């Protein structure tokens, strides 16, 4: 691991997003009846929070962090048969929380896939990316949507 012992603790925030797209038929089933396994979005939210908290177990050399906030929210993009997943992670620490936010989005998408695979394997996950980070030496990063980044 990188030595962060000389770094100053600051408030760190990261927001990431991603999406899972269904076939039109599967998306209708998702919206109307959900999964026989249970509440899809609540389960995906818990999976995202757990992934953020356990990122050092998933990603080699990540520092364990004392997370202060993990939120996972969903937006239904009905015209695209898509669920957009947005995660935000906050802590006061010596290193950023980007990996935790990205892990949260990834795990939430994977959970939705797992719970809805009974409708077929036509789902596609993608667009997982960092949207914002703040805190630390490198300052603020904000993804510009106008440039398609």
Image (spheres, grey):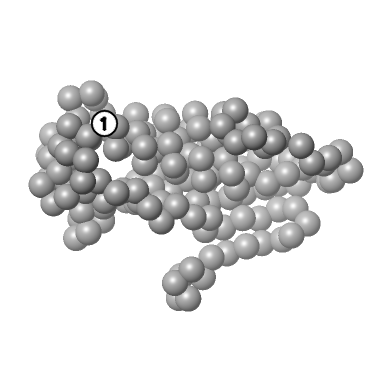
Q: Count residues near mark 1 (Cα–Cα under 10 Å), then give few for <14, some for 14-19, many for 20+.
A: many
Q: Position of residue 6 (x, y in %)?
A: 89, 43
Please identify the residue farthest to the right as the structure is shown: 6
Q: Is residue 122 above or below residue 110?
A: below
Horizontal placement of 58 versus 28: left or right? right
> Residue at coordinates 44% horizontally, 72% vertically from top-left?
148
Q: Is residue 23 above or below residue 70?
A: below
Is residue 75 at all visible to an observer of this figure?
yes
Q: Is residue 70 above or below residue 37?
A: below
**Which residue is identified by label 1?**
115
Q: Position of residue 75 (x, y in %)?
A: 32, 51
Horizontal placement of 50 versus 122: left or right? right
Horizontal placement of 60 versus 123: left or right? right
Q: Position of residue 17 (x, y in %)?
A: 44, 52
Q: Nearer the viewer, residue 74 or 126?
A: 126
Looking at the rendered structure, the number of numbered marks drawn on it comes to 1
In which quadrant of the rendered image does the N terminus lie?
A: top right
Q: Position of residue 117 (x, y in %)?
A: 22, 34
Please identify the residue farthest to the bottom as the structure is shown: 147
Is residue 89 at all visible to an observer of this figure?
no
> Residue at coordinates 17% horizontally, 50% vertically from top-left?
23
Please identify the residue farthest to the top as the structure is shown: 37
In the picture, residue 60 is in which quadrant? top right
Q: Nearer the viewer, residue 37 or 86?
A: 37
> Residue at coordinates 53% horizontally, 51% vertically from top-left?
15
Q: Is residue 125 above or below residue 48?
A: below
Q: Secondary structure at mark 1?
A: helix
């Amino acid at each position: 691991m990188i030595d962060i012992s000389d770094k100053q603790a600051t408030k760190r925030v990261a927001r990431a997003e991603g999406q899972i797209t269904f076939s039109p038929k599967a998306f209708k089933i998702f919206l109307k009846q959900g999964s026989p396994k249970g509440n899809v979005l609540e389960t995906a939210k818990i999976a995202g929070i757990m992934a953020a908290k356990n990122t050092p177990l998933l990603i080699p050399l990540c520092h364990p962090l004392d997370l202060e906030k993990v939120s996972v929210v969903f937006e239904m993009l009905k015209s695209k048969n898509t669920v957009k997943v947005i995660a935000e992670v906050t802590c006061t620490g010596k290193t950023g929380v980007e990996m935790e936010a990205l892990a949260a989005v990834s795990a939430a998408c994977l959970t939705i896939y797992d719970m809805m695979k009974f409708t077929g394997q036509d789902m596609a996950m993608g667009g997982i990316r960092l949207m914002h980070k703040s805190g630390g030496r490198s300052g603020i990063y904000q993804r510009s949507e106008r440039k398609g980044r």
